[in-house]
Image: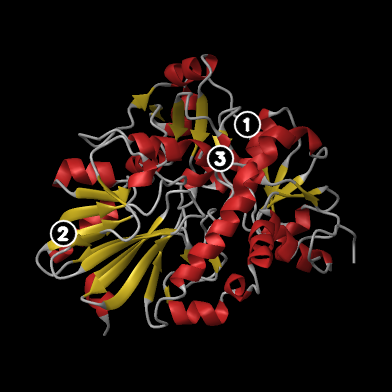
Amino acid sequence: MGFADDHLVPLVDEGLGNSAYLLDLGDGRALAMDASRDLRALHAAAERRGLHVAFAADTHLHADFLSGAVQLGHDAGATVLASAAGRRAFAHRGLADGDEVDLGGLTLRALATPGHTDEHLSFLLLDGSRELGVFTGGSLIVGSAARTDLLGADRTEELARAQYRSLKRLTALPDETAVWPTHGAGSFCSAPPGTERTTTIGAQKQTNALLGAPDEDTFASRLTASLGTYPAYFDRLAEINRRGPAVLTADPLLPALSPQQVRALTAEGGHVVDVRPAADYAAGHIPGSLSIPLRDQFATWLGWLLPDTAPLAFVTGEDQDPSEIVRQAYKIGYERLAGRLAGGMSAWLADGNRRTTTAFVTADRAAGRPYVDVRQESEFAAGHVPDAVHLELGGLPAAAADAPHGPVVACGHGERAMTAASLLERAGHTDVAVLDGGPADYAAHHGLRLVKGTENTRS
């Protein structure tokens, strides 16, 4: 059993693809690293171990979630540790390259590792002179390095080159040094697929293709070529994190709304989000509502597809927890939550309102329809149905006119496809069907071979 097993608790957010860490300092105190505003898992881990959070550190100004550091400072009196170059507008201890923090027996040393952001720090954990591990945030991650285009296309290559130099610095650490990244598989900050979320310097030197680049030019070219799209809310959160998210003094609630209040909200420019499973939405939903099933990825698609400036009402199922909606929305800065429809769709229909249905079909019932694939480009390239029309879900609001008439919309299983169908219906499309399954199911039933790359010709 090693140091990490004894003292370090990874806290994985499967939806956003990130890891926070709770470090047991051995004296009843703890360090929280890159904690999000949704602190439930961190508080539970600290309570289990009888720990008080004395320090809350952030490796960078996060774009994909609101930091929980300010809240920990308020609730627990934690000292917030962050880069001085980030110009944060709240109480914190600003650190520069080489600065050290005495954690009481252990030492945290700041290492300037720009690339993902300008002010990015990695934090090297030391026991005396021995390097135990390094919190690499959005610098070195398992199998890759974090994206460098969040500050604009005009700076992407410059930051990629900075990332190269930062990774060179990190890989100069001893091979046995543990690597504890923030971004992991599922993160739109550029982590490749995989199950491993922590690693070592030595393992990455052997397996990370980016680290095998022979020079800075090749590294920058490889990294920038791998960058896909990312959620729209990423462009807003770094500045909110710089100013400091608002402190929550009570658990936010989701009030009950009558059908009349929901109708009034939409008439005034608000949005209705239906969080029920895809099959329930298909069977009957409020016309014009957006389907975003309540699951780990809920926050990502809420923040990608809807503005944070309009009030939101939610349609839930009987067994769904409204507090989960609130926590996921708040961690990406969505706070204009008007409430949820009391009584759900039954109340809506009992009030004399209309509902709409969407065909949710298996592969045998999808024949003859144009096939629209709404997965990410990397997923599409890994294998898609011949002649499929590729329209990424995140870009669909602007590309709805490009969708063919009467399509079957598909993703990997059906959840994102139902979201896409709801967007197409909002844009005026009729006769939209959703595939209950993925491309492999469709291809197997119709005797097709999946096509790799971006080629769309039947093979």
Is 367 on the left-hand or right-hand side of 309? right
Q: Which mark is residue 356?
A: 1
Amino acid at circle 3 = Trp
Considering only order in the chain, which callout, 2 or 1, is on the residue closer to the N terminus? 2
Between the C-alphas of marks 3 and 1, the distance is 24 Å
Is 374 on the left-hand or right-hand side of 282? right
Q: Residues within 10 Å of mark 2 (few under 14, many from 20)?
A: few
Q: Which mark is residue 290?
A: none
Q: Nearer the viewer, mark 3 or mark 1?
A: 3
Q: Residues within 10 Å of mark 3 (few under 14, many from 20)?
A: some
Label 2 element class: helix
Amino acid at circle 2 = Glu
Q: Is residue 39 visible?
A: no
Q: Nearer the viewer, residue 202 or 416?
A: 202
> What x and y, as percent, mark residue 145?
54, 63
Between the C-alphas of marks 1 and 2, the distance is 46 Å
Amino acid at circle 1 = Thr
- Pointer 2 residue: 47
- Residue at 79% from the left image edge and 67% from the top image edge: 450
- Pointer 3 residue: 304
- Residue at 32% from the left image edge and 45% from the top image edge: 37
- Residue at 56% from the left image edge and 29% from the top image edge: 286
3 and 2 marks in contact (CB < 8 Å): no
In this picture, is 420 found above or below 206? above
- Residue at 74% from the left image edge and 36% from the top image edge: 399
Residue 318, image quadrant? top left
Is 367 on the left-hand or right-hand side of 116? right
Label 1 element class: loop
> What x and y, as percent, mark residue 20?
34, 59
Between the C-alphas of marks 3 and 2, the distance is 34 Å
Considering only order in the chain, which callout, 2 or 3, is on the residue closer to the N terminus? 2
